[in-house]
């Protein structure tokens, strides 16, 4: 073990990566052998300690790099212990000489900076984890380039994720019981394999394009001489929302995605739209001459991310005859060539009666979401579609479609399922999770799988986008509910539609949830 400078305690062992590189150089200059370990270390347990003690035996100086908080994507709540606490815990160990925060998830950058003589990884760390196996391969290559060697320890094995899930109040009791039930029927590997099997589905997304603008402000309250809210502008961000966001979510899980949507000639935002769609999405826009592309400009208090005002730029009247004709021409013979047609109907004019009729007639498997908002409240309901294979709407939209505020929700879901001819209907219920019904199978429910919410906008779109291919592929309802709520838990941690829910993040979260 290295001899630290006088008075160097636990916290004094914590250095920047630049400082660590310089310290390592000095130790190497006097002939000392450098050993490097890397990881999250969200809960330092006996397995970690034995691993680090064993690693220290490979040399004279043991340095540990810790993954920064924003790269810990095990689930929507991130690490239980923040990066400072994780670093302090490691620095308190006698066998550890230095600790540094690493801004990359893999150790590659740190290895290149430190050039350790030995990089030590736990032999069991990649078990049942393809992502970890891939990371280890990158790190092994980096060690070889730096002239070092890889060593593996095989000490007593524990799982931080399992210990945290079992002994910390990360999820509600209802969620914990649900996960125990799901894990008895499905392993994480089986769930992930089922999601990977969606890759070859051909998906046609049809729906309204929305450009979401978030204007972040410092709100000061009511102006002194009027009832207006006074706020200081901070910054603005613009995201691809509506059917654009749905297509982006789908395109992470399915390789071939086509999007038919409506843009306005008055302010098309076409360049922005094309730049913010994933490369495997084929865009087929329909232009209407009497409107801009729908823009929703939200003013958001920057500290708590609370929305306090919204202005929309749109024309939500049905497409004029010429534009409707172009939409029908785009769809002529198109839907029948796809495994799944997914309609994201925000009620902004694209889905006219004739377009709805064409889609329902041609789609081999039809998934539909009809959204209510302050503009179309009460008018844009799922029953405007004569036939739906998979309906995915929230509880309020379900009650509005059934024209019943008070009846038990299962009665309304069953009635709508029969009316639409659904193979499956999913009703999302906010903090109450989701309720699914399949004729012949009955009802299944799934609780919320996250306690932290940043922004609910876009969560329903993400739920729809990932569950619709699952329904098309014939996955069981209980598995679909679990997957949908896992997706929703990740989505509510994203501001608006700033990012898509990506497969790798979902796979990691599935492993976390089912490692209990």
Image: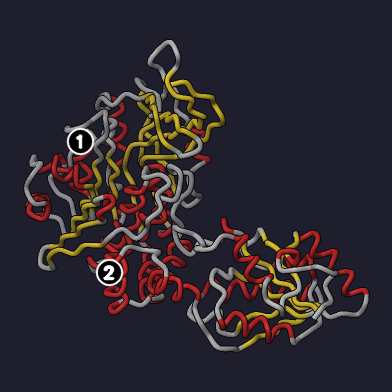
Give the Cα separation between the discs numbered 1 and 2. 33 Å
Vertical side of 398 occupied by 504: above or below: below
10 Å crowding of disc 2: few (<14), some (14-19), many (20+): some
Question: What residue do we see at 40% from left, 33% from top?
Answer: 307
Which type of secondary structure does the marked residue at label 1 adopt? loop
Question: What residue do we see at 79% from left, 64% from top?
Answer: 20
* Upstream in sequence: badge 1 or badge 2: 2
Question: Which residue is nearer to you in this view: 405 or 97?
Answer: 97
Question: What residue do we see at 29% from left, 49% from top?
Answer: 342
* Quadrant housing residue 345: top left
Q: Position of residue 28 (x, y in %)?
A: 88, 75
* Quadrant housing residue 47: bottom right
Question: Farthest top residue?
Answer: 225
Vertical side of 80 occupied by 456: above or below: above
Quarter of the image with the N terminus in it: bottom right
* Quadrant housing residue 102: bottom right
Question: What residue do we see at 13% from left, 43% from top?
Answer: 399
10 Å crowding of disc 1: few (<14), some (14-19), many (20+): many
- Circle 2 is placed at which residue position? 178
Quarter of the image with the C terminus in it: bottom left
Q: Position of residue 451 (x, y in %)?
A: 37, 56
Does residue 509 appear to the left or right of 118 in the view shown? left
Pair 1/2: label in front? 2
Question: Which residue is nearer to you in this view: 380 or 378?
Answer: 378
- Circle 1 is placed at which residue position? 380
Q: Position of residue 2 (x, y in %)?
A: 82, 77
């Amino acid at each position: 073990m290295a001899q630290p400078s006088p008075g160097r305690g636990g916290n004094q062992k914590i250095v920047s990566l630049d400082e660590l590189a310089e310290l390592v150089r000095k130790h190497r200059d006097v002939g000392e052998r450098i050993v490097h370990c890397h990881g999250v270390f969200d809960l330092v347990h006996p397995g970690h300690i034995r691993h680090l003690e064993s690693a220290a035996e490979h040399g004279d100086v043991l340095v540990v790099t810790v993954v920064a908080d924003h790269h810990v994507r095990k689930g929507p709540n991130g690490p239980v212990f923040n990066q400072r606490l994780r670093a302090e815990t490691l620095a308190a160990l006698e066998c550890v000489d230095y600790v540094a925060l690493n801004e990359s998830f893999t150790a590659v950058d740190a290895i290149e900076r430190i050039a350790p003589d030995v990089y030590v990884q736990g032999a069991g760390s990649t078990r049942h984890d393809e992502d970890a196996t891939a990371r280890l391969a990158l790190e092994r290559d980096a060690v070889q380039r730096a002239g070092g060697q890889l060593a593996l320890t095989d000490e007593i094995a524990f799982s931080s994720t399992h210990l945290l899930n079992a002994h910390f109040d990360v999820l509600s009791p209802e969620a914990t019981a649900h996960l125990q039930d799901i894990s008895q029927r499905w392993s994480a590997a089986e769930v992930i394999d089922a999601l990977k099997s969606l890759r070859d589905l051909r998906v046609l997304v049809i729906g309204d394009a929305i450009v979401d603008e978030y204007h972040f402000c410092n709100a000061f309250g009511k102006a002194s001489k009027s009832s207006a809210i006074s706020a200081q502008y901070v910054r603005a961000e613009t995201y691809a929302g509506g059917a654009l966001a749905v297509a982006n979510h789908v395109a992470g899980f399915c390789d071939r995605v086509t999007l038919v949507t409506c843009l306005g000639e008055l302010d098309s935002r076409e360049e922005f739209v094309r730049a913010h769609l994933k490369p495997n999405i084929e865009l087929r826009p329909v232009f209407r001459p009497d409107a801009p592309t729908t823009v929703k400009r939200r003013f958001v208090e920057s500290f708590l991310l609370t929305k306090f005002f919204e202005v929309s730029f749109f024309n939500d009247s049905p497409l004029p005859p010429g534009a409707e004709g172009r939409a029908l021409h785009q769809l002529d013979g198109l839907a029948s060539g796809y495994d799944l047609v997914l309609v994201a109907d925000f009620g902004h004019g694209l889905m006219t009666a004739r377009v709805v009729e064409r889609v329902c007639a041609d789609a081999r498997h039809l998934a539909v979401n009809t959204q209510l908002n302050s503009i179309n409240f009460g008018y844009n309901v799922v029953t405007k579609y004569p036939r739906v294979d998979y309906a995915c709407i929230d509880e309020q939209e379900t009650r509005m479609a059934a024209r019943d505020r008070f009846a038990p929700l299962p009665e309304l879901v069953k009635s709508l399922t029969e009316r639409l001819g659904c193979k499956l209907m999913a009703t999302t219920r906010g903090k109450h999770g989701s309720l699914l019904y399949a004729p012949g199978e009955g009802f299944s429910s799934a609780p919320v799988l996250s306690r932290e919410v940043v922004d609910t906008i876009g969560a329903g779109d993400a739920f729809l986008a990932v569950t619709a291919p699952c329904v098309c592929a014939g996955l069981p309802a209980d598995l679909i509910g679990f997957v949908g709520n896992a997706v929703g838990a990740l989505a509510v941690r994203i501001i608006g539609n700033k990012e898509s829910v990506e497969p790798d993040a979902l796979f990691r979260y599935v492993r976390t949830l089912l490692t209990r």
